[in-house]
Image (tube, rainbow, N blue to C red):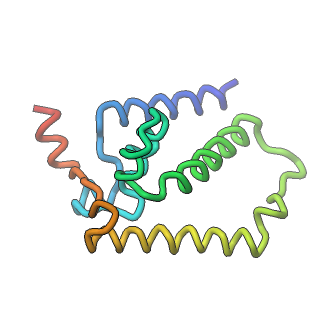
Amino acid sequence: MRRAAVVLALGGLFALIYLEHVPICPMASVLGVPCPGCGLTRATVALMRGDLREALHLHPLVWLISPIFGWAVASAAYGFVRGPRANASLKPWLDSRWMTALAFGVLALTLGVWGARFCGYFGGPAPVETLSHWARTHLH
């Protein structure tokens, strides 16, 4: 039961951070430069609202990366709540060469889109807010 409470508390904390629009990306909030995944959280929320056009504008790979990330977070949370297992091992398909190649492909695609956005494609770089700007506008 404690493990479930930890997962719920972390979920609540992330929801609060999102609702308060606190910039959490280290690269964007400190340097003011969008990271390869900048815009994905906003794009995922737009996708969940059914606004595909806005979602694709915020990050063109939202349709690919968000489900993968959602599965990974849900799987990790479930595994944490369930607790350690005696014979727990990595799933064979997850440790396969084709999964490694697929992960590398998604990474290369993400970095390619990131670079293309700096060149003005896909709507240009995602808009970011630095932590200092957020603090000036939200804490005063």
Q: Quadrant of residue 119?
A: bottom left
Give the number of marks.
0
Q: Quadrant of residue 112?
A: bottom left
Q: Nearer the viewer, residue 104 or 88?
A: 104
Q: Nearer the viewer, residue 125 or 13?
A: 125
| Vertical comparison of 86 with 16: above or below | below
Please tell me which residue is depicted at 76% across the width and 39% down the height of the picture: 83
Image quadrant holding the N terminus, namely: top right
Please tell me which residue is depicted at 84% across the width and 63% down the height of the picture: 92
In percent of width and height, residue 103 lies at 62, 68
Please tell me which residue is depicted at 12% across the width and 37% down the height of the picture: 137
In percent of width and height, residue 123 lies at 29, 60
15 to the left or right of 136: right
In percent of width and height, residue 128 lies at 25, 53
In percent of width and height, residue 62 lies at 48, 52
Q: Nearer the viewer, residue 87 or 41?
A: 41
Please tell me which residue is depicted at 79% across the width and 70% down the height of the picture: 96
47 to the left or right of 35: right
| Vertical comparison of 56 with 44: above or below | below
132 to the left or right of 56: left
Image quadrant holding the C terminus, namely: top left
- Can you name the residue that lies furthest to the front here? 53
| Vertical comparison of 57 with 3: above or below | below
| Vertical comparison of 73 with 108: above or below | above
Q: Nearer the viewer, residue 93 or 125?
A: 125
